[in-house]
Amino acid sequence: MLAIGGLALITVLTRAFFMIPRREIPMPGWLRRGLKYAPLAALTAVIAPEVFMTQGVLLTTWQDARLPAVLCASAYYFYRRGILGTIVVGMLVYLPLHVGLGW
């Protein structure tokens, strides 16, 4: 019980670190700009291996439904800037290729 309580306390403190002080924590401008890109960098680090690798090995064929789906979804996002539409377009390309053609 002590370990669980300690881990819970550490988790709350680390996640609420920026909300605990009453005033804004002074940060250099370069750090503030860099923190704006942290969520995008984390998402890319999680998604990229899922798209370009299978069981820890890079894809060796273009007949993988993930590649055209990513290309179409990216094109849609850069054209319309909508997250929901990006997901829908990606799945509309991925599912027929994966289920229908077995890619």
Image (cartoon, rainbow, N blue to C red):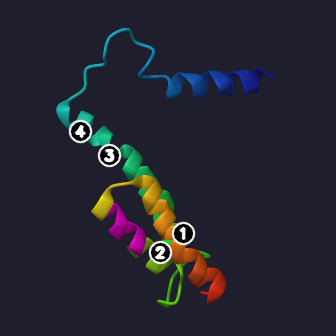
Decide which of tag 3 and tag 2 comes sooner along the chain: 3
Location of residue 45 by image quarter:
bottom left
Using the image, determine if residue 97 lies above or below residue 49: below
Main SS of the magenta segment? helix
Using the image, determine if residue 81 lies above or below residue 68: above
Q: What segment carries the magenta color?
A: 72-78
> Mark 1 against mark 3, which lies toward the viewer?
1
Crowding near pointer 2: few (<14 within 10 Å), some, many (20+)? many
User: What residue type is disc 3 on?
Assistant: Tyr
Residue in the picture at 53% in, 72% down: 92
Using the image, determine if residue 103 lies above or below residue 77: below
Location of residue 6 by image quarter:
top right
* Label pair 4/3, CB-CB below 8 angstroms: yes
Using the image, determine if residue 23 lies above or below residue 45: above
User: What residue type is disc 1 on?
Assistant: Met
Secondary element at tag 2? helix
Residue for badge 1: 91
Residue toward you, 64 or 100: 100
Gap between marks 3 and 2 measured at Cα: 24 Å
User: What residue type is disc 2 on?
Assistant: Ala
Decide which of tag 2 and tag 1 comes sooner along the chain: 2
Residue for badge 3: 37
* Label pair 1/3, CB-CB below 8 angstroms: no
* Label pair 2/1, CB-CB below 8 angstroms: yes
Residue for badge 2: 69
Gap between marks 1 and 4 measured at Cα: 33 Å
Crowding near pointer 3: few (<14 within 10 Å), some, many (20+)? few
